[in-house]
Amino acid sequence: MDSLICIDGVVGAGKTTLGEIFCQKHHFTFFKEPVDNNPLLERFYHDQERYSFPTQIYFLNKRFRMLKEAQKMGTCLMDRSIYGDVIFAKLLLLEAKMSQEEFELYEELLFNMLEHVPRPKLMVYLEINVDNAIKRIAERGREYEQIVPKKYWELLNQQYQAYFDAYNFSEIVVIDVNELDFRQQGQAQNQVLELIEQKLLSIKNSPLLV
């Protein structure tokens, strides 16, 4: 794999939309987050204690497989990735939706997997406040996301902030998207793309230069 870019951020931040826009412009291979075909996700939102551990393992396994596929290719962009997956597991542990034993098993699997995959060239973190994220979640209209209480999204956002404040796996660019609706062509979209492009061009062996 020549270069991997990851986009991360809380639910509703716009990861998939931005990934599709960037890949269309730069002809990257796009790896979309494995959400739509996840047979456990809707059950998880209705019964988190029962489905937290198997849901986390499902995502971990899918993201590891995606990284292995990306290794065989050239320039790729990943909609969320294995690197930020632990954010959800830690939140579930803090909320007592996952046991300490389950979390330790999950974490051991994660660390073992990270030893066998390359680090990304760049991590793009989309920063957004809870109210704006909830608004975009409502616009998206996934029924199982609408039943989630605001407190959960607040705690999740706190975990994201803490994780990416300490992130050191790769180069990172943080983009505040609260006032940047990049879903349509225009100034906001150009601004977000330019921030990513400028950061990439500052990195040795940038995928935009090869």
Image: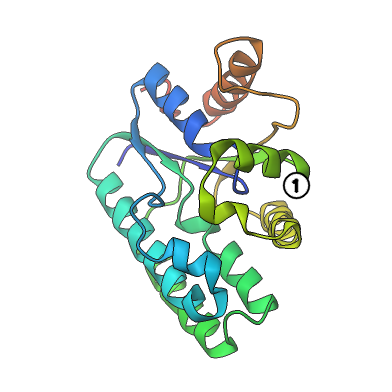
Q: Which of 86 and 205 is in front in this view?
A: 86
Q: Which of 92 and 90 is in front in this view?
A: 92
Q: Which of 149 and 4 is in front in this view?
A: 149
**Residue under the point 65% across and 23% down:** 181
Q: On the rendered structure, is 155 left or right of 199?
A: right
Residue 91, quarter of picture: bottom right
In this picture, is 104 found above or below 48?
A: below
**Residue under label 1:** 130
In this picture, is 160 found above or below 210?
A: below
In this picture, is 188 found above or below 36?
A: above
Residue 187, quarter of picture: top right
Looking at the picture, how far across and down is residue 202, in whole percent?
57, 26
In what quadrant of the picture does the C terminus appear?
top left
Looking at the picture, how far across and down is residue 40, in whole percent?
40, 66
Q: Is mark 1 on a helix, strand or loop?
A: helix
In what quadrant of the picture does the N terminus appear?
top left
**Residue under the point 55% across and 73% down:** 48
Q: On the rendered structure, is 45 left or right of 129?
A: left
Looking at the picture, how far across and down is residue 66, in whole percent?
31, 52
Camera sees residue 204: no
